[in-house]
Image: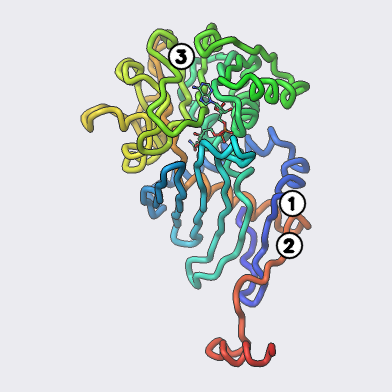
Amino acid sequence: MTAPLPSHKAMVPFVSVKNMMRLVHDVGIESMLRDLCDRIEDDFRRWDAFDKTPRVASHSRDGVIELMPTSDGTIYACKYVNGHPRNTADGLQTVTAFGLLAEVATGYPVLLAEMTLLTALRTAATSAMAARHLAPKGAQVMALIGNGAQAEFQALAMKAVCGIDTLRLYDIDPGATEKTLRNLAGSGLTLVACASAQAATEGAGIITTCTADKQFATILTDNMVGAGVHINAIGGDCPGKTELHRDILLRADTFVEYPPQTWIEGEIQQMTRDYPITELRHVITGAAPGRRSDSQITLFDSVGFAIEDFSALVYLRARIAGTDFYEDFDLIADPDDPRDLFGMLQRAR
Ligand code: NAD
């Protein structure tokens, strides 16, 4: 699926926000979410091919800036992403991102892209990938707690991949829920606004938490989680930033992306290292069981891992080949004589 590499003299293809939006509409968002889900799953199956490291985080009082690199030996990917929960009060987003792909053989970049939208899409696709292995069979109702920027993407991925047909919404800010109701009207989902997180969880087979707060928050308490439920916890993704009461983890079977990163950033940072976790990739390959019974509580402790961004960027690169959904970006100085960088500068005078 990877497009032929451009010659080294070529400009670097750049996918702007505008072109990303054109592409999503051209492909169709649900179709794109399904494609991304399959691409990420394919890459999770070949896990050992990748270089892996917990993301490199720079923490500050109000947020975090992170770099997320990985490589499969042929292609290298890296994403810049931030998480600043207080940003929305100033009209800024909590999460923004951009990323690149490079050719390992030469180190030359082959794609530069906006990734604020692409992160929302790949995070939702990853949630759906986990849910299709872990959620109770036939689950049609999802509680969605936290109705911010990620919310609609999470909802549509669960609809497209897992067949969710009803969404029970709650946010501490009713304006966020109203926005989500507006955006999802006409999506085919039955939408129910709820007065509390507890009310939202009633009758839900899947509970998704995607709140943003830079603290150990308790979005879900143990009494809200009935037997058989699948929890998709995406908002706790930083040291000191969690969403679930620890008692839920004591009752749940917990599934993670890359343990060395999840121990630092996920819900499991509340637990000691002898707490049992299962790597999602092992469930995908059949090496470990996923859901074993109707009464089991499963928890996907999502933090977001670099391989998901790799998959999304490689998918994007293949999708834009032969289209006008990108611009050529003059990013890499390219003297005719590779050692005459200074001469190139002089001649440009
Ligand atoms: P956002 O700021 O746009 O939305 C967060 C929403 O949560 C807001 O509407 C806010 O009012 C609501 N909220 C905060 N506290 C709440 C509470 N106690 N109860 C109910 N609602 C509450 O943020 P976003 O871009 O939607 O991201 C949501 C979270 O997901 C962030 O924490 C972000 O870091 C995380 N995230 C995780 C991944 C991943 O791969 N796991 C990827 C992207 C974002």
The residue singled out by tag 2 in the image is 327
Q: In this view, does 141 lie above or below 279?
A: above
**Which residue type does callout 3 highlight?**
Val
Comes first in the chain, label 3 or label 1: 1
Give the residue at the far front of this rendering: 90
Mark drawn on residue 19: 1
Residue lying at 55% horizontally and 12% vertically, measured from the top left = 200
Q: What element carries label 2?
A: strand
Q: Mark 3 points at which residue?
A: 229
Q: How many marks?
A: 3
Q: How crowded is mark 1: few (under 14 residues within 10 Å), some or many (20 or more)?
A: some
The amino acid type, in three-letter code, at marker 2 is: Glu
Give residue 112's quadrant in the image: bottom right
Q: Does the residue labelled 2 lie within 8 Å of ligand 1?
A: no
| Mark in front: 3 vs 2 | 2
Between the residue at mark 3 and the residue at mark 1, the CA separation in whole angstroms equals 38 Å
Residue 49 horizontal/vertical position (percent): 41, 53
Local crowd at mark 2 within 10 Å, few (<14), some, or many (≥20)? some
The residue located at (58%, 46%) in the rendering is: 96
- Residue 161 quadrant: top right
Mark nearer the N terminus (3 vs 2): 3
Residue 303 shown left or right of residue 274 in the figure: right
Element marked by disc 3: loop
Q: What residue type is labelled 1?
A: Asn
In the image, taking residue 10 as reference, residue 257 lies left or right, namely left
Query: Which is more N-terminal, label 2 or label 1?
Result: 1
Give percent across and percent down for residue 346.
63, 92
Q: Label 3 neighbourhood size at 10 Å, few (<14), some (14-19), many (20+)?
A: many
Q: Are marks 1 and 2 in contact (CB under 8 Å)?
A: yes
